[in-house]
Image: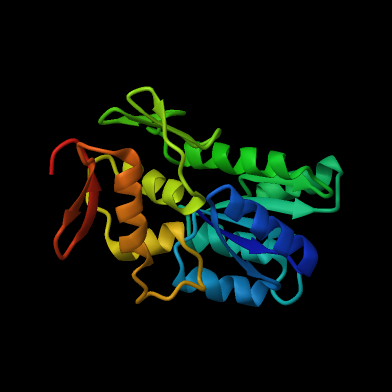
């Protein structure tokens, strides 16, 4: 999952970003509405954590823009306002969820995961393919009943590959979904991460390279 955090309080924005990265969620940060719209134009985000009261383009207008131009992207709106009327307005604008400040970070993560599962209507709570089981809520991976300890980035890559349902995922798509905007697109980090992930999962290999195309997760090449 890749998220865009739109928050003008620098310390809060950084805290959310660090927290999401620890949960294997790639996260970019912008501090105003204009930058949010610019980032949305060039990156494919799964969800936007959107502060309603931000400089530049107002959060309400950013939300409306996402609904109109990026319908696959989900929005969790953040605000200090707590009244029912404020929440109703947020949902009327097209927000998928609404979280008043201050909030507990674990609740934000649970809501993000719930939105991800709801967006992918056919996705079960736990993914199980080729003897590998992945639980996105608990961030646990098992193969043949054996617990597999993964780094945050390895977990994020495995999540993307298993969600493809046996389809090929390009290196560009992996960068888009598992890394943030600061990643060098010419880095070999994808190849290294895939290699480490294969070793951790063990044989027979379930991550296969499709030359010139990308990677696929399946029992057979």
Scheme by which the image is coloured: rainbow
Q: Residue at x 37, y 57 (%)?
A: 193
Q: In this view, does 175 lie above or below 86?
A: below
| Residue 217 falls left or right of residue 14 | left
| Residue 68 falls left or right of residue 90 | left
Q: Which residue is drawn at 71% across and 64% down?
A: 14
Q: Which residue is drawn at 21% across and 41% down?
A: 205
Q: Is residue 70 above or below residue 31?
A: above
Question: x, y (%) of residue 217?
Answer: 25, 43
Which of these two is toward me, 164 or 185? 185
Which of these two is toward me, 61 or 139? 139
Question: x, y (%) of residue 47?
Answer: 55, 53
* Residue 9 in view, yes or no: no
Question: x, y (%) of residue 159?
Answer: 40, 44
Q: Residue at x 46, y 54 (%)?
A: 153
Locate the C terminus and report the quarter of the image it occupies. Answer: top left
Seen from this angle, which residue lies furthest top?
145
Numbered-mark total: 0
């Amino acid at each position: 999952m890749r998220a865009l955090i739109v928050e003008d309080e620098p310390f809060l924005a950084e805290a959310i970003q660090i927290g999401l990265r620890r949960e294997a969620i790639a996260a970019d940060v912008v501090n105003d509405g204009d930058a949010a719209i610019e980032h949305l134009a060039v990156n494919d985000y799964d969800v936007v954590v959107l502060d309603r009261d931000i400089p530049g383009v107002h959060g309400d207008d950013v939300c409306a823009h996402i609904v109109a131009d990026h319908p696959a992207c989900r929005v969790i709106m953040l605000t200090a306002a707590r009244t029912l009327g404020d929440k109703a307005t947020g949902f009327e604008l097209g927000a998928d969820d609404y979280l008043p400040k201050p909030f507990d970070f674990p609740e934000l993560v649970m809501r993000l995961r719930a939105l991800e599962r709801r967006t992918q209507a056919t996705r079960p709570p736990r993914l199980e393919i080729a003897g590998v089981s992945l639980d996105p809520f608990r961030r646990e991976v098992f193969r043949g009943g054996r617990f597999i300890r993964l780094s945050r980035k390895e977990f994020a890559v495995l999540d993307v590959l298993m969600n493809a349902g046996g389809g090929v995922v390009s290196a560009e798509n992996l960068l888009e979904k598992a890394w943030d905007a600061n990643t060098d697109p010419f880095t070999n980090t994808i190849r290294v991460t895939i290699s480490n992930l294969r070793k951790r999962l063990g044989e027979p290999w379930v991550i296969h390279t499709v030359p010139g195309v990308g990677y696929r997760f399946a029992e057979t090449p």
